[in-house]
Image: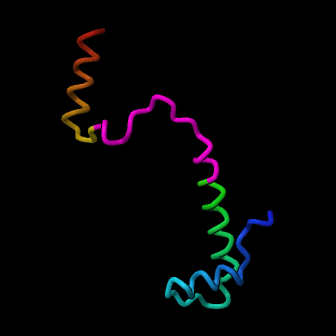
Amino acid sequence: MSPADLTPPEAARWAARAGLHLPDDRHAAAAATANHIHSVVAVLRELDFGDTPPAGAYRATAGAYRAGKEKHDAAV
């Protein structure tokens, strides 16, 4: 456990601060979950997205996908 890891009592305090009642037997599980999420987010922060356009540049509709696929198929 690193010094930055959330302890079970701290998890209980944060839950109470957010207005959530956390039963005593869930403090350790909540702390472990928060620590895991924190470790995943820390890795994501280190990723270099370079020239990746923002999410708004993509269209998630089936029609846009098909149109792009047809263009690709026509070029091949």
Name the residue at the top extreme.
76
Q: Does the magenta-highlighted stretch encompass residue 15?
A: no
Counting from the top left corner in percent of width and height, residue 57 is at: 31, 36
Task: Look at the image and tell me in which quarter the N terminus lies.
Answer: bottom right
**In the figure, 13 relative to 30: above or below?**
below
Which of these two is toward me, 22 or 56?
56
Colour pattern of the rendering? rainbow
Counting from the top left corner in percent of width and height, residue 24 is at: 66, 90
Which of these two is toward me, 2 or 32?
2
Q: Does the magenta-highlighted stretch encompass residue 57?
A: yes
In the displayed structure image, the side of residue 30 where residue 65 appears, left or right: left
Q: Bounds of the magenta span?
A: 42-58
**In the figure, 62 relative to 8: above or below?**
above
Q: Residue at x 51, y 83 (%)?
A: 18
Q: How many marks?
A: 0
Task: Look at the image and tell me in which quarter the C terminus lies.
Answer: top left
Q: Residue at x 23, y 41 (%)?
A: 61
**In the figure, 2 relative to 11: above or below?**
above
Q: Residue at x 59, y 40 (%)?
A: 47
User: Which image quadrant is residue 70 in?
Assistant: top left
Counting from the top left corner in percent of width and height, residue 34 is at: 62, 68
Q: Residue at x 71, y 80 (%)?
A: 8
In the displayed structure image, the side of residue 18 where residue 75 appears, left or right: left
